[in-house]
Image: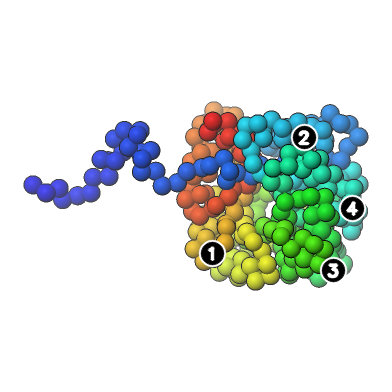
Amino acid sequence: MTPSFYRGRRLRRTPALRDLIRETEIRPQDLIQPYFVVETSDSSFAQPIASMPGQYQFSLDRLEEQVARSVDAGLRAVILFGIPAHKDPMGTQAYADTGIVQEAVRRLKTRFPDLVVITDVCMCEFTSHGHCGILEDNYVQNDVTLNYLAKTALSHARAGADMVAPSDMMDGRIQAIRMILDENGFKELPIMSYAVKSASSFYGPFRDAAESAPAFGDRKSYQMDPANLRQAMCEAEADLEEGADIIMVKPALPYLDVLRRIRDGFNVPTAAYQVSGEYSMVKAGAQLGWIDEQKIVMESLTSIKRAGADLILTYFAEDVLTWLA
Ligand code: PBG
């Protein structure tokens, strides 16, 4: 008798058979580890971030040590967030040539020339009010902010960054950054745009880590409404027209439908950012003994890849490398 139904189990019988037909794989070179670097005179500073167990604010020296360990474990790319010693309304330390991010880039590129060093380009860690741009009448001014973002990106490029990643969500910032980079001899420097970035509650722990919570209000006048999928397509399209090389979707796991639409809609590499809140929830569940951290992380990252991410920014990158080894 001919079988009348599909027997999917035939190919699930043994581990080798399952491995043979696996469609999605996490590769070490897909992962980008975020780091928080603090401007401090205490060179051995390594402050654990309470809401993100396993993550730290590092001094330059401690960052270098940590990255050395990760590179040994196979890490290929990092993204840097800076916490300056002094904040002011204009976020001066974001674009200072001696700023903490610029120093960190120089330090890492000198020691690890092959490491891909990406910088987050934003004002919120550097402004005293914690908003991602320049304020007037307590409202973030779009076009004024563009000059500051462009200056910041250029200072990162001059320090030796391999890629800049604007996360501010001002309109026109990819164009402004592309122009200033091109005019200053950085035509070949790629831009990874946080193009599809929602005004998400999943960033809560990050704002502790980066000390960047807005002093008043929220970010809803510049970050996207999580409810909007068509708008996500508009944002990505605009950023590509302005010169973005990689489009990022953020957060990741709760936005897999957005990720898939972006991946199918545009022929450029797609990145996903598994953000702080996604990380902290897994950590909390694991600490309570309610979930298996490693399995949950690998399943989540596999889902993010399956939904279309070519690269993944994740605080679990270092751990995943050791698990894969
Ligand atoms: C800066 C920035 C944020 C994140 C990345 N870049 C915070 C925010 O927009 O409030 C969040 C990353 C995370 O939650 O892990 N604008």
* Residue bearing mark 4: 96
* Residue bearing mark 1: 267
Marks 3/1: CA–CA distance: 32 Å
Could you say where residue 145 lies in the image, as x and y percent from the top left?
A: 82, 65
> 70 or 146: which is nearer to us?
70
Q: Is residue 317 above or below residue 156?
A: above
Q: Quadrant of the C terminus?
A: top right
Q: Badge 4, how many Cα within 10 Å: few under 14, some, many 20+?
A: some
User: Is there CB contact under 8 Å for labels 2 and 3?
Assistant: no
Q: Is residue 26 left or right of residue 126?
A: left
Marks 2/3: CA–CA distance: 35 Å
Residue at image point 57% right, 58% down: 269
* Residue bearing mark 3: 144
Tell me which amino acid carries mark 3.
Val
Judged by depth in the image, the label closer to the viewer, 4 or 1, is: 1
Colouring style: rainbow
Could you say where residue 223 lies in the image, as x and y percent from the top left?
A: 69, 61
Judged by depth in the image, the label closer to the viewer, 4 or 3, is: 4
Tell me which amino acid carries mark 4.
Ala
> Which disc, if any, is residue 64?
2
User: Is there CB contact under 8 Å for labels 3 and 1?
Assistant: no
